[in-house]
Amino acid sequence: MPNPELIALLTAGSALFKDHEHETRGGVVLSRCELAGYLAGMTHGAALMAYAKWGQDEHSMQQLIAWVRVVAAGMAVEQGWEVVRGQPTILNLAAIATYEVVMPMVHEVCEGRGVVGFKTCTGCNGTGRKSLSSRAIQEAAGIERMSWRRHWEGRYRQIVKAVVELDAEVQRSSGVVRLAG
């Protein structure tokens, strides 16, 4: 099997990405060629995450949502979640969780930096990102308030955790701490 580091060097282009990168709302966007080198050796889910998040590729985003839906359905079966037949609750929550991780909202107080002055921002706990409110998620997924609180809120957090783990895998595999500005 070819050496992933060699493939990365051959396909990634310049190490500085100066000629190909451009700034967007969340940071740097890399070309598919650069991402191909960057992704060498990652799992399929992590590669989809990288293409969707760092390449802002809509097709990869749709594939990532489908992948997360399968993971969430697996959680539901494994943990015995009761669902109403014909209601796409798990599918909706998987899509919302994917969008929340891939396209996080910037926290206004710290302007996405995670710090205010020289102190960690208390509003976002230093992440620079603002999470969707429970009410917004519950309404978008079409879940009644009491059902959300009793059953679905914790399950949603499990789905988000699975998506966050994919993002962490991308960053671990690449050796890049953070590409976004």
Image (cartoon, helix red, strand yellow):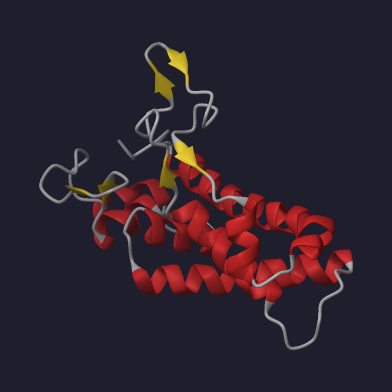
Q: Residue placed farthest to the left in the image?
A: 19
Question: What residue is drawn where x is 52% and y is 64%?
Answer: 44
Query: Is residue 134 rendered to the left or right of residue 19?
Result: right
Residue 8, image x, y percentages: 33, 50
Query: Is residue 11 rendered to the left or right of residue 3?
Result: left
Q: Foreground residue, 143 or 112? A: 143
Query: Is residue 58 rendered to the left or right of residue 19?
Result: right
Question: What residue is drawn where x is 49% and y is 60%?
Answer: 99
Residue 118, image x, y percentages: 40, 11
Q: Foreground residue, 148 or 7? A: 148
- The answer, for residue 146, to whether it is visible in the render is yes
Residue 77, image x, y percentages: 83, 72
Quadrant occupied by the C terminus: top left
Q: Number of callouts in the render?
A: 0
Q: Is residue 123 above or below residue 14?
A: above
Question: What residue is drawn where x is 40% and y is 61%?
Answer: 52
